Each structure stands twice: as C-alpha cells, then as structure tokens.
Amino acid sequence: MEQQKAIIETQELTKAYNGQAAVDRLSFNVNEGEIFGFLGPNGAGKTTTLLMLLGLTEPTAGKARVLGVDPARDPVRVKGMIGYLPENMGFYRDMNAWQSLMYIAELNGLSQDAANRRIESALRTVSLLNESKKEVGSYSRGMRQRLGIAEVLVKEPKVAFLDEPTLGLDPDTANRMIELVEGLCRVKGMTVLLSSHLLHQVQKICHRVGIMINGRMVAQGQMDQLAEEKLGVGREQYTLEEIYMKYFREA
Ligand SMILES: Nc1ncnc2c1ncn2[C@@H]1O[C@H](COP(=O)(O)OP(=O)(O)O)[C@@H](O)[C@H]1O
Ligand SMILES: [Mg+2]
C-alpha cells in the first residue's frame, strides 16, 4: 500500500472550559487527499477542535499539527495555509462578492492577474458569477455559503476545514455543495476536514469518519469497517445513520 501522509495530527488534544472538557483527549489523523467526516451532535466539540487546529483557541492539553506546524505556536502560519469555512460566515455586507474575494486574494498576496483569474473561476464553480456584483448583504444563506466556498477556492489551500457547510441549506443546494467539495478534493487533491451532523450527505463523499460524542471520539475509520464491526453487515447494507445511532446509544 502507498505510504499515507498525515496532514492533520492530534494527540490527546484537550480543551476545557471552566473545568469541563469540551474536547477530551482527542487523537486522530487526516491523510493527504482525504475527506474526513467529523460527526457528532450539537455540543460534541467539533467546532472547538477546528478552532484549536486553526490556532484560534489554545488547547488545555495535548498536541496538534497541521501540515507539520503546531497551531498553538505558529497560528499565523497555520491560518495562512488553511481554507476555513466557519459555522457562521461573517461578511462585509456592503461589499459585493467580487470585492470580498479580491480582499481575500490581496490578503494572500496574489498578483492582480492571478487574483482576477482565480476569482472568476471560483465564482463560476459556485455558480455566483452572474451575481458577483450584488452586495453580499442581500445574499440568501445558500449564496453566502457558496461565497464561503469561493473564498476557499481563491486561496487554493492544501487543506480545508468546513464547519457544517450544508447547515441551513435546502436539500438541492446542500447536495450541490457536497458535490462541489467532492470535486475539489478529487481534482485539486485538497484534504478536507468536514464537520456535520447531516449524515446521509457525509456518507456520499467521506473516505473516513470520526464520531464525536461529549468531547470524545468514540469511533473512527472507514464506514464499511465501522459497519462491519458495529452492525455486522457488509458494504452497501447500512446507512451511516445506523452506525452513528449505535455508537450514540452506547455513549
Ligand atoms: N467559548 C466557550 N466558552 C464556554 N464553553 C464553550 C465555548 N465554546 C464551546 N463551549 C462548549 O463546549 C462544548 C462543545 O461545543 P462545540 O465545539 O461548539 O460543539 P459542536 O461544534 O460539536 O456543536 C459545548 O458544551 C459548548 O457549550
Ligand atoms: Mg459546531
């Protein structure tokens, strides 16, 4: 088998708020080119984990590495390397989509030429090219989420963290979003850590999943393997929801 390169690594990563562990001794890896589905109910600790990996909040204990860099020691460098779609996208409401992407391009030091090319291509990919001159403040949630993905595209990161990218989207838009992520991974070789509690979407595109409950990762692996272990069934005889519920009931 080909040697797999870990892009994200954590060891016993822990975050406590007021003595309560929001993330409790979390150890997992995400390999190059993989889409890793980070699953769990609200309050499980998914966003807190992403924030630690981004260097936006400091761990209480344990270690993390993203592309070999420790986010707690070098948050600026780590943030520069990661494309991040936060749970709640903040935008400059009175900029239009093109302007807000140009702002991202400039922050990332792209030349004017490269910026124009990438912005046009990103807007086309997320089907916002025709609406790129409208103020972002007038966008629907689905359009804002797609603009968030366009920001990731303009940056062309090696690794992207997408926190609930389909939350609040109608099923059709959500499916397009999921296909978009899958395509980025396949075509650009991007590594994706995707948090979600919407399981049937995750099941379609993730190579591996981790199930987080009360700050602990209670299972991780390929879905077929978890189904075999937990449900005793083979390929295509299960839904991710069945696996998830089994772990959830036992936790
Ligand atoms: N800034 C904070 N201060 C105190 N508690 C927090 C803070 N952020 C998150 N928490 C708590 O940590 C736990 C995990 O939250 P979170 O990481 O947002 O979960 P998820 O993203 O899986 O829904 C929750 O119990 C939440 O209330
Ligand atoms: Mg969250």
Image (cartoon, grey):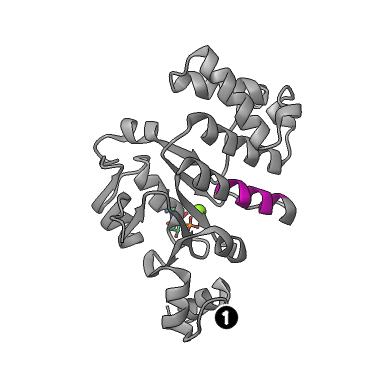
**Front residue (pair 217, 82):** 82
Bounds of the magenta segment: 173-181
Tell me what residue is drawn at x 30 percent, y 44 percent: 58
- Is residue 34 positioned above or below 229 on the image? above
Q: Residue 13 location, x and y as percent?
A: 28, 56
Q: Is the magenta stretch mostly helix, strand or loop?
A: helix
- Is residue 143 positioned above or below 235 on the image? above
Q: Tell me, yes or no, whether the highlighted magenta stretch contains residue 178.
A: yes
Q: Residue 216 location, x and y as percent?
A: 36, 67
Left/right placement of residue 136 relative to residue 237 reads right
What is the count of numbered marks?
1
Q: Residue furthest top?
A: 112
Tell me what residue is drawn at x 58 percent, y 62 percent: 204
**Front residue (pair 51, 171):** 171
- Is residue 74 positioned above or below 214 on the image? above
Residue at mark 1: 237
| Amino acid type, label 1 | Gln
Q: Residue 132 location, x and y as percent?
A: 71, 25
